[in-house]
Each structure stands twice: as structure tokens, then as C-alpha cells.
Image (cartoon, helix red, strand yellow):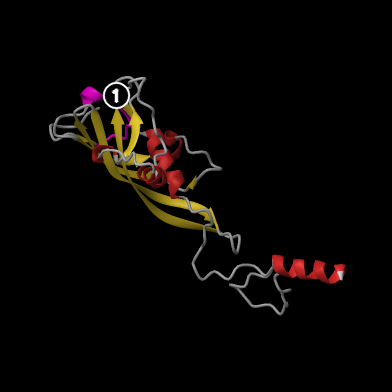
Amino acid sequence: MIGDMTGVLTVARLGFQLTEIPEEGLDLADEVQPDELGLLPEEAQVGEPLSLSARLTNVGDHVYVEGVIDGTFARECVRCLKGYEAYVEVPFTAAYQGSDPTVRSRGRATKDRHQESDEEGTSEPSDQEDDLYVCTGDRVELAEMLREHILLSIPMQPLCREECRGLCPVCGQDRNEAPCSCIEAPKRTPFAVLQERLKKST
């Protein structure tokens, strides 16, 4: 339920009627379970509830949301293949517009899309620079928006630490624990392969 007259919500809810957002705005501060966001285990491993802090502001026909969601994620290093935990803060900003069928939801609106618009000479007005979502009826649903921001924050090649030395490709020894005496074969480049073919043809 909505909190006191200060417009603070202390019970985690991710969906709101537009009429529930007071003129002075609504502040959220609580924990969110991964399944509330629809996060699948293969998408993100979360060791504990995520902390959500956000503010919703109703301005005209838009609801603006700004905040941060943070927590500890379990990941696997791409170099040594060991699991590790990473504390991550994911800031987010988004705007929700009324569910007009002529409005196309842009869900995963990223900087690339803004850059494409600028290159085409169709840059958007400044009030639409946030990620734009469409309300479900007269409700603002935060779950999908938060899920997308979390997924976009996941590194393509997670590392337990920048100086991780990884595994030896020959014997599999973890080089962070001890060195090995293996001699790696030099990496073959496309030019080396071409040179070999030229030698065979002459």
C-alpha cells in the first residue's frame, strides 16, 4: 500500500496505477526478488535479493522513473573458468507514456539507437532521451524495464579480476595458482596460412 503523505513506498511493488503517484512524486526503497523481474537462472545468477531505490514523477502524459538497482551477482570468469561474485550497481532512467496504439514501445532504447537517429537527422526531442516504455492500460509496470537494464549491464566477457592469467591452453593449469612449463604453439594468422598455400603451389 502507499506510504504516508511524503509519498514514500516501503513495500516493494513493481506496478502502479497512474492515480497512485502523487503530485510530489513517489519514492521506492526496498528489496526485489529476481523472479519478480522475470530473471531466469541462465540469464543472471543472483545470490540475494536486489536493492531497489527509485523515484517516480508524473509529468503531463509521462511518468519518469530514475533510480538504481544493485546486488551481488554470481558469474564465471572467461579466463580461469572459476565462479566469483560481483557487486553491481545498475542505474536507470526511463519514461512511460500512455498506452496509445499509435505509440511504439522502444523497450531496449540504447545509445546506439539515439546515435542512429542523429545520423539520420531525426533526433528526438530532449524530453524523450530516456528509455521510453508504454503504460499497460493506466498502469506503470517496472519489472520488464528493470530486467532489461540488468541484462544490458552484464559484461560479454566477465573477469574475476583484470589481471587474471587464465588457464594454460596446453595442460589446463590455472596460472593464477602456479606457472607451468608448457610451450605454447605460436598463434597462426591468416597470412601464415596464405604463405603456406603459396609455398605448396610453387
Q: What residue is at 19 percent from the left and 28 percent from the top?
A: 60
* Residue 68 seen anywhere in this rendered image of the structure: yes
- In the image: residue 3, left or right of residue 89: left
Residue that carries the numbered disc 1 in the rendered image:
98
* Residue 171 seen anywhere in this rendered image of the structure: no
Which is more toward the observer, 50 or 164?
164
Q: What residue is at 54 percent from the left and 69 percent from the top?
A: 164
Residue sitting at the far front: 202
Quarter of the image holding residue 196? bottom right
Q: Position of residue 129 (x, y in %)?
A: 29, 41
Task: Indicate the secondary structure of the residue bearing disc 1.
Answer: loop
Is 111 situated above or below 193? above
Q: Position of residue 184 (x, y in %)?
A: 71, 74
- In the image: residue 136, left or right of residue 184: left
Disc 1 packing (10 Å; few <14; some 14–19; many ≥20) = some
Is 56 situated above or below 153? above
Which is more toward the observer, 114 or 33?
114
Type of residue at label 1? Gly
- Residue 14 in magenta stretch: yes
Q: What residue is at 71 percent from the left and 74 percent from the top?
A: 186
Specify the segment rendered in magenta: 10-20
Which is more toward the observer, 34 or 93?
93
In the picture, which quadrant includes the N terminus?
Answer: top left
In the picture, which quadrant includes the C terminus?
Answer: bottom right
- In the image: residue 25, left or right of residue 46: left
Q: Position of residue 170 (x, y in %)?
A: 73, 69
